[in-house]
Amino acid sequence: MAKRPPKRSDRSVRREQERNREKLAADREKLFQLEAGGNKERPLDASSAAVIEAHAASVPCPRCEGQQEVLEHSALIHKGVRLREAKLRCRKCGSERSLFFRIVGPSIN
Ligand SMILES: [Zn+2]
């Protein structure tokens, strides 16, 4: 008969789940920052400044998929490129991050 692993207490299982969730959230946050829009090197294209806040607010929190609100929307220049930074805060878990945009003007396609 196969040996069963020793049964752990509920509390230690919960602690481990909590740690795993936290690690997963941190990984998602890192991934978010590597993806387009998550950093200054790879801004998202926006057709105008007016669409940035709606776009930014539609991106779910990478940690908990909660809805985010735009705290601040500012212009900056990174390596000669004019960017917009939307500072976001998750309404659910309270974590904060930024999304970066480059205004490319209306598409001619
Ligand atoms: Zn969240």
Image (spheres, rainbow, N blue to C red):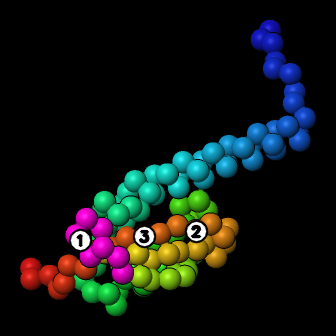
Q: Is residue 90 above or below residue 51?
A: above
Between marks 3 and 1 in the image, the one whose residue lies nearer the viewer:
1
Which class describes the residues within 10 Å of circle 3: few (<14), some (14-19), or many (20+)?
many
Q: Nearer the viewer, residue 101 or 1?
A: 101
Q: Kindly identify the residue that appears in the image at 36 percent across and 81 percent down.
A: 75
Amino acid type, mark 3: Leu
Q: Is residue 98 above or below residue 27?
A: below
Q: Name the residue beneath numbered marker 1.
A: 81
* Left or right placement of residue 91 versus residue 107 in this view: right
Label number found at residue 99: 3
**Label whose residue precedes the other's in the sequence (3 or 1):** 1
The number of discs equals: 3
Mark-to-mark CA distance, 1 and 2: 24 Å
Label number found at residue 96: 2
Q: Position of residue 65 (x, y in %)?
A: 57, 65
Can I make out residue 71 in this image? Answer: yes
Amino acid type, mark 1: Val
What stretch of residues is rendered in magenta? Answer: 75-82
Q: Kindly identify the residue that appears in the image at 67 percent across and 49 percent down.
A: 22
Q: Position of residue 10 (x, y in %)?
A: 88, 40
Q: Kindly identify the residue that appears in the image at 81 percent across and 20 percent down.
A: 5
* Left or right placement of residue 5 versus residue 51 in this view: right
Give the SS element for disc 1. strand
Which class describes the residues within 10 Å of circle 2: few (<14), some (14-19), or many (20+)?
some
Can I make out residue 66 in this image? Answer: no
Q: Nearer the viewer, residue 46 or 20?
A: 46
Q: Kindly identify the residue that appears in the image at 87 percent across and 27 percent down.
A: 7
